Image (cartoon, rainbow, N blue to C red):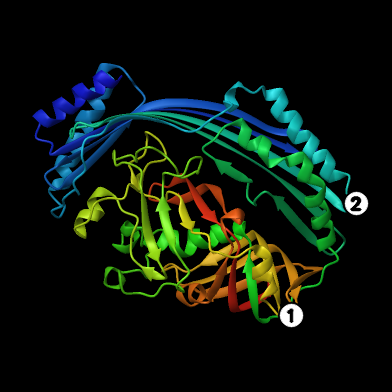
Amino acid sequence: MKELLKDVMEFLKSKGASYADARFEEHQEEKIEVESTKLKKYSYDSNRGVGIRVLKGSGWGFAATDVLTKDGVFKAAELALKIAEESAKRAEKLELAEEPAHVDKFESPVQKDPFEISKAEKIELLREATAKMLKVEGIKRARAVMDFRKIRKVFVSTDGSDIEQLITISGAGIEAFAVSESDFQRRSYPSSFGGDYATRGWEFVQEMNLVGNAEKVAKEAADLLKAPEIEPGSYDIIIDGQQMALQVHESCGHPTELDRVFGSEISYAGGSFLQPEKLNKLKYGSDIVNITADATIPGGLGSFGYDDEGVKAQKSYLVKEGLFVGYLMDRQTAARLGLRSNGAARAQSWRHIPIIRMTNINLLPGNKTLDELISEIDYGFLLATNKSWSIDDMRVNFQFATEIAYEIKAGKLTGRIFKNPVYYGRTTEFWNSCDGIANEDHWHVWGVPNCGKGQPGQIMYVGHGTSPARFRNVKVGVAK
């Protein structure tokens, strides 16, 4: 296949393409869902194909095919070329940021291939976890899921790049649902909306200890049925690492996507308040807030060797000591600012054209323990595990609901819990109120496997390294 793709690159150059690339990808995916000890869903899917991009003049063309014969691949190349030629008649002049040719291979750090673990073993683990949750009084439903993916990629370009990658993804999680005559509550582990994910193997699922945590998760769900709601007001709060992952995702990751800044997403997913005139000038957060885009973290769900334009994975700052200093970029948008791409062009599959996506967008750890963060609050709450969220099209005004709030009084957790908490804010005001971040002992890279963007829509796998963080005088209320 690689030699065929190289032949296609030579053909496209001979037809006047100023740039072209081709991605062969082979995908495998296994999904399992168990509900209340019964297998609810099992699926296995595989597909493979080639996506070809062509730049001729100022026009892009893209075509994809799963007909992997020489004739099929060349037909896709010819179609991409034709689209580029037609696009050039209406397109404004564009340039691509420089990128050297790379000849390399990359593999995710996997100890145990999840596709070599039997279906029966996986299902039994999920059944055992749900059975344990159902033993807790008040739990009416228990759910457990697993998801495994393996992606093989071959990338070649007219620049001379020749890159092979093997990326393995593993994820799992559990949920307990408590029901009374007048209420319904849920607790999730290790994260909501399907659990946690990483570019690792079966060992990642084993480390979660789903069965060992099932009873605790279920008891908290049941206890929430009897818990009070927070009296609305302004409080000092600590947000746990899993909820911080979504906070970073929505209020820093998305607004720093440079295509969104330039208006490419405005009709679908919105724009961004982080316009170019604010670069290196806007005080995004307090001095302790440092946020990076880092695709080099071993095992991070947003980690890889090279993006889908052949740009090498790297670490770059988006916010440094509270100052907004960088964007997520592809080669085209980076060139508009006279910069180099930081490797954020990614496609869901061979069927999709690369667009700017998050990698691992991380809030770097601070220098406090969680106990120290708690000890410096007279009265407030520790909010944990996302329940729902909303943020406006420019990524300024937001609200986030969490599954649970733990009361803090006189610098200690009291043991009381509150249900249906929601906190509100404006992005820069919120981040400037951050006065404490837990240290690296509490830091974890959370996987978000379902980030949507683009037209046609694409789902991408991204990561967020976070630890619990403290914010002062935040509006907190009750989610209804």
Relative vertical location of residue 320 with respect to residue 349 in this rendering, above or below: below
**Distance between the alpha carbons at the discs numbered 2 and 1:** 28 Å
Q: Residue at 20% of width from left, 54% of height from top? A: 335
Neighbourhood count class around disc 2 (C-alpha, 10 Å): few under 14, some 14–19, many 20 upward: few
Where the N terminus falls, by quadrant? Answer: top left
Q: In the image, residue 135 lies at what x, y percent?
A: 89, 44
Q: Residue at 49% of width from left, 72% of height from top? A: 431
Q: Residue at 45% of width from left, 74% of height from top? A: 428
Pick whichever, 73 or 215, lies toward us: 215
Relative vertical location of residue 319 with respect to residue 156 in this rendering, above or below: below
Label 2 vs 1, first from the N-terminus:
2
Q: Residue at 56% of width from left, 28% of height from top? A: 111
Can residue 270 be seen from the camera position used here? Answer: no
For numbered disc 1, what is the local secondary structure?
Answer: loop
Residue 264 falls left or right of residue 428 = left
Kind of residue at badge 1: Glu
- For the image, the number of numbered tags is 2
- What residue would you read off at disc 1? 231
Q: In the image, residue 451 lies at what x, y percent?
A: 49, 50
Residue 118 falls left or right of residue 398 = right
Residue 363 falls left or right of residue 223 = left
- What residue would you read off at disc 2? 137
